[in-house]
Image: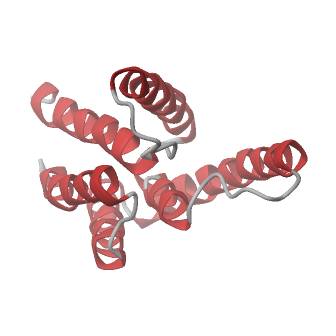
C-alpha cells in the first residue's frame, strides 16, 4: 500500500516525457528517493542491496552490449538513450528481484516500442524519439496498482 506514493512523481514524469521528451531532475530524484525508501521499508536494507547489485550488474551488461551495437551501427554519431532514461531504469532496481526485473524490462520495453510504432502510424509529426520513461512508467504504474489491488 505504501507504494502508492510512487504514483505521484511517476505520473509527473510520464507527462513531462510525453510533452517535452525530458524530465525535471527534481522529479526524477524525488521518485528515486521514494523508490529506495519504499523498497527499504518493504524488503529491508539487505534485500534492497542484493536487488540493487544484481539488477545494476545486469543493467551494465545489457547497457554495454546496447552501447556497443549503437556505436557500430551509427558510427558513434547518434545518442540513442538519455541520462534521464538510464537513471529512471536504475531507480527501479532496488524494488524487484533479478528475474522479475528482467521480465518487467522485456514486457515494458516491448509495450513502449509497440505503442510508439502505433503512435507513429497515426501522427505525422517528425518526432522520432521514443518516450522511454513514459512507456516504462505506465507499465510500472500498472505494476504498482496491480500489486496494491491484488494483494489482500
**116 left or right, relative to 26:** right
Q: Nearer the viewer, residue 56 or 70?
A: 70
Figure check: 63 above or below 24? above
Q: Nearer the viewer, residue 135 or 34?
A: 135
**What is the quadrant of the C terminus in the image?**
top left
Q: How is the image coloured?
A: secondary structure
Rendered image quadrant of residue 146: top left
Residue 82 position within the rendered picture, expressed as x and y whole percent measured from the top left: 56, 61
Q: Is residue 113 something that shows in the picture?
A: yes
Residue 68 position within the rendered picture, expressed as x and y whole percent measured from the top left: 85, 49
Rendered image quadrant of residue 6: bottom left
Q: Is residue 47 something that shows in the picture?
A: no
What residue is drawn where x is 39% and y is 57%? 21
What residue is drawn where x is 79% and y is 47%? 70
Residue 115 position within the rendered picture, expressed as x and y whole percent measured from the top left: 39, 25
What residue is drawn where x is 68% and y is 58%? 79
Residue 147 position within the rendered picture, expressed as x and y whole percent measured from the top left: 21, 34
**46 left or right, relative to 141:** right
Amino acid at each position: 500500500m505504501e507504494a502508492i506514493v510512487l504514483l505521484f512523481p511517476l505520473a509527473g514524469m510520464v507527462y513531462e516525457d510525453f510533452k517535452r521528451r525530458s524530465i525535471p531532475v527534481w522529479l526524477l530524484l524525488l521518485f528515486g528517493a521514494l523508490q529506495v525508501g519504499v523498497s527499504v521499508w518493504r524488503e529491508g536494507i539487505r534485500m534492497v542491496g542484493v536487488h540493487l547489485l544484481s539488477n545494476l550488474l545486469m543493467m551494465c551488461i545489457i547497457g554495454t552490449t546496447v552501447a556497443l551495437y549503437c556505436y557500430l551501427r551509427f558510427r558513434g554519431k547518434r545518442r540513442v538513450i538519455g541520462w534521464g532514461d538510464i537513471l529512471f531504469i536504475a531507480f527501479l532496481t532496488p524494488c524487484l528481484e533479478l528475474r522479475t526485473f528482467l521480465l518487467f524490462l522485456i514486457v515494458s520495453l516491448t509495450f513502449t516500442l509497440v505503442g510508439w510504432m502505433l503512435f507513429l502510424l497515426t501522427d505525422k509529426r517528425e518526432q522520432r524519439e521514443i518516450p522511454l520513461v513514459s512507456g516504462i512508467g505506465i507499465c510500472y504504474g500498472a505494476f504498482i496498482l496491480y500489486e496494491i489491488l491484488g494483494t489482500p
